[in-house]
Image: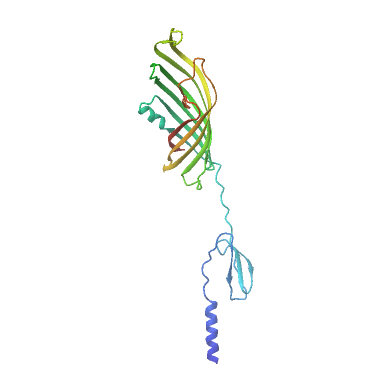
Amino acid sequence: MVIGMLLLMCQTSAAATETLAPLSSPEGETIALPALNDTIEAPSGAVGGATPTTTSRDTLTISLPTQKKEKPRFLQGAAVGADFFGLALKAFGSDWRQMEAFFRLNLYDSYFPIFELGIGEADHEGLEIENRFRIRAPYFRVGVDHNFANKKHSGNRIFGGLRYGFSTYNYDYDAPGPVIDPVWKTSQICSEHDLSGHLHWMEMVIGVETKLWSFVRLGWDLRAKMRISQKAPETGEPWYFPGFGKNTAGLVWGGSFKLVFDI
């Protein structure tokens, strides 16, 4: 019987000297540790900055410090870039083309105010009477895009936005010979230079953008354009509006293919 009691005391002593496993717990949670001694005292900051809040014969409750999440900065950066779609039209001999650059800001990786500036030009020859239309004028757009991607800080973006555009222009119109009136059979030379006007319009934009390397990005977008107001010469509207597109009824569709550099 004495031997049995000695064995029991040895087992109890060995259990009391076991080392506790390292603590791990999500931020802000509390954990309870078994305690075999009558009282357990732990100095402040003994477990990763944690402070014991309750001691007793049976348990030790420890509150782990909660780390505050940093709020994203309001201004995440800026970017400059250029549209290569208009340059491609010029390279392939299109009747109209444009050269465009832009500057934009990045707010919270969610909102992107943007300013676009370009020059539009056209040199078009009619198929029926071989009349010729020429124009070259600047334009600008200002607006904002919103990033609809779920992971806004991943570098890949899905854009939707609006633009306001404006262009003031002068254009020339020439016909190769006199134009004959079909009713009165009279002829008249048709040649007009420096005809001036301007156009205001709105654009709805959808597009995507991806990060290629470090500060270099590539993106494209599709745009639906609608006139707001305009002033045209008495002789008629131009064949092409700089920054807006060809003179057609209803919505005018366009797009851009952009190379972007974060700064």
Q: Residue furthest bottom?
A: 1
Can you say whether 193 is above or below 251 in the image?
Answer: above
Q: Residue at x 53, y 42 (%)?
A: 110
Q: Residue at x 52, y 86 (%)?
A: 7
Q: Residue furthest left?
A: 92
Q: Is residue 213 visible?
A: no
Can you say whether 1 is above or below 143 in the image?
Answer: below
Can you say whether 11 is above or below 70 in the image?
Answer: below
Left or right position of 146 against 215: right
Q: Position of residue 223 (x, y in %)?
A: 48, 34
Q: Is residue 99 visible?
A: yes
Total residue callouts: 0
Q: Residue furthest front?
A: 183
Can you say whether 1 is above or below 255 in the image?
Answer: below
Q: Residue at x 55, y 77 (%)?
A: 16
Closer to the camera in the image, 117 or 230: 230
